[in-house]
Image: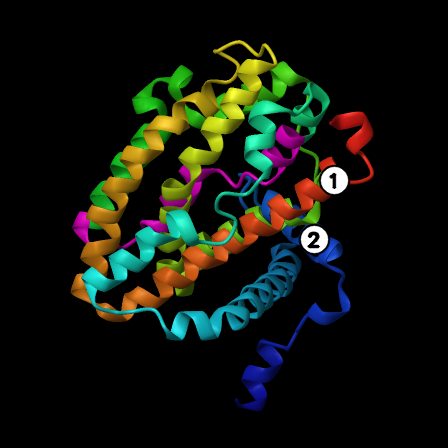
Amino acid sequence: MSTTSQSLYPSRRPRFASLSSAELQQRLAHFNEKRFRPGFIDEDWRTDLAEELEMRELEGEMVEAARADLAEQIAAVPEDADAFMDWFEGLRDTGPGQNDALFPWLATRASMEAMRWFVSQEIGGEAGFDDLVALAQVRLPAQPKLEMARNYWDEMGRGKEPGMHGPMLERIGQHLGVRARIDETVWESLALANMMAALASNRRYAYQAIGALGAIEMTAPGRVSQVNEGLKRLGVPALARQYFQLHAGLDIEHSKAWNREVIRPLVEQNPCTARPIAEGALLRLSCGARCFERYRAELWGERRNSLH
């Protein structure tokens, strides 16, 4: 790099290793809250841009550290479309975090206080599936793009505000009297939202984002159905738990379509996309597994006497 370009683009590498997990994820959560919010022109935009560069470097280092942890697994992922789809769809049963004991407990034993805490953490770790799909579909081939558009349209309630999925999640929070606050959300939940935002908003991770979103659609129904059962057991009315009730069934159909219309065509057209897609799925599922472990530690640990 020339002396001129070095002066124009100074190195602002953040101290990734010096931050605790909680500090890192809270900083990224505040950054994502700001960067995705509509704003106004600021005369000091260069300072904002320099701060954004630092945070995006930090974000990239987070993703790359997580990718490094998966390198051995990803090297073994098949690139043939049929073999890859068998591997990918197998994650429904064998992927990180699947069949976690937390969810049968929520369905059958959790108290209202425990459920309120759980829902507050889930809201805190929600990155907005509709916006993630919108970001991930940019410049994709026609077939995957069309399926992602159909998925987005469902997320948007097919053009009717009461059917929008995002506000449904807000409604359960309002009914239970909880809301998402960064400083009250465990870092593992923030990390899940930050990872999804990182993959969807950086085109170098485009295929990872597709894999991560596909993994959500494929693995969510079993979990959300048990959350819905727990809420129903605790007397929460159907309208308030609509988010969980809806996704218990709808995501099954979304997953079938996503695998058939998005993932398989991409891998068939270019086998080199298989491993990035697999990587994204494992990144998302690993974040989820870490969340479930933390949730169990909170709900079954020191707080168990008051929450169990």
Closer to the camera, 259 or 185?
259
Q: Which residue is mark 1?
A: 298
Q: To which residue does mark 2 refer?
A: 27
Find out whether residue 135 is within the magenta segment: yes
Tag 2 secondary structure: helix
- The amino acid pointed to by label 2 is Arg
Q: Residue at x 29, y 36 (%)?
A: 254
Looking at the picture, how far across and down is residue 197, in whole percent? 51, 50
The three-letter amino acid code for the residue at tag 1 is Glu
Q: Position of residue 67 (x, y in %)?
A: 51, 68
Question: Taken as a whole, is the magenta stretch helix, strand or loop?
Answer: helix
Q: CA distance from mark 2 to mark 1?
A: 23 Å
Q: Which residues are magenta?
A: 118-143
Of 132 and 191, the residue lying toward us: 191
Q: Is residue 111 left or right of residue 161?
A: right
Examine the rendered structure and indicate whether residue 116 appears above or below residue 72.
above
The quadrant where residue 17 appears:
bottom right
Q: Quadrant of residue 66?
A: bottom right
User: Can you say which quadrant of the picture contains the C terminus?
Assistant: top right
Residue 301 in sight: yes
